Image (cartoon, rainbow, N blue to C red):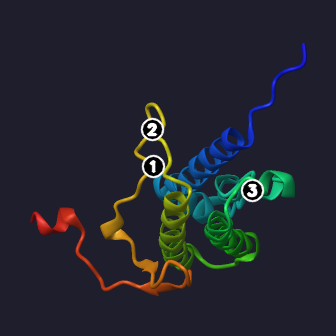
Amino acid sequence: MVPVLPDEAVRSRRLKTLLALEISRIVEDLVSRRDFLVQMWSLHRDRTPFLETLSSRWSSLTMGELLNLEDEHIVAIEAFYREVDEFRLYIRFTQDMPVMLSGRYDWMTKRLESYGQLAVEQLGGAPIRPGGPPSHPDASLLKYTLDAPAAGNLVEKPEQPHPADAAE
């Protein structure tokens, strides 16, 4: 029996869900593994854990699969993965010492969080993984935002205190 292929709407919904989950996973993993990754660099100068954390299926998607996405989805996703590529390039070739790497890591992760949130929002949100952290970062902590949704330009937001700091 030949399996029935899902219609275009189902394929589009599934692709958006998979991409939103992957984007959320990359950002969550970079945040949660930060100390471990910097320590691995400090002790062993090993790039592999960084590169594995940044791995994605985005580059393996075909044009036919991408046709299932709307233009605004593609623009937001491409912006996120361009930042991932910049991070990956830095990790591949850096000779920075751990303190410098740590600062650069934090800066690049914040950018990825911002671009990731924009992409996940465009895709309709990421479902919460069973047993995992929520896939939606706290928007008040983001440093960058769109100045105009149609323009797609990131601008720096004014500094806002972390909610936990306000409670003190």
Label disc, if present, on residue 58 of the rendered structure: 3
Q: Which residue is mark 1?
A: 135
Q: Residue 134 at what x, y percent from top left?
A: 40, 45
Label disc, if present, on residue 132 of the rendered structure: 2
Mark 2 surroundings within 10 Å by alpha-carbon count, few (fewer than 14), some (14 through 19), many (20 or more): few
- Element type where label 2 sits in the image: loop
Q: Residue 137 at what x, y percent from top left?
A: 40, 58
Q: Residue 8 at what x, y percent from top left?
A: 74, 43
Q: Amino acid at mark 3?
A: Trp
Q: Is residue 97 above or below residue 4?
A: below
Label disc, if present, on residue 105 of the rendered structure: none
Q: Residue at x 80, y 58 (%)?
A: 59
- Element type where label 1 sits in the image: loop
> CA gap, disc 2 to disc 1?
8 Å
Report the mark closest to the observer, 2 or 1.
1
Q: Amino acid at mark 1?
A: Ser
Q: Is residue 23 left or right of residue 82?
A: left
**Looking at the image, is mark 1 or mark 3 earlier in the sequence?**
3
Q: Is residue 51 above or below residue 81?
A: above
> CA gap, disc 1 to disc 3?
18 Å
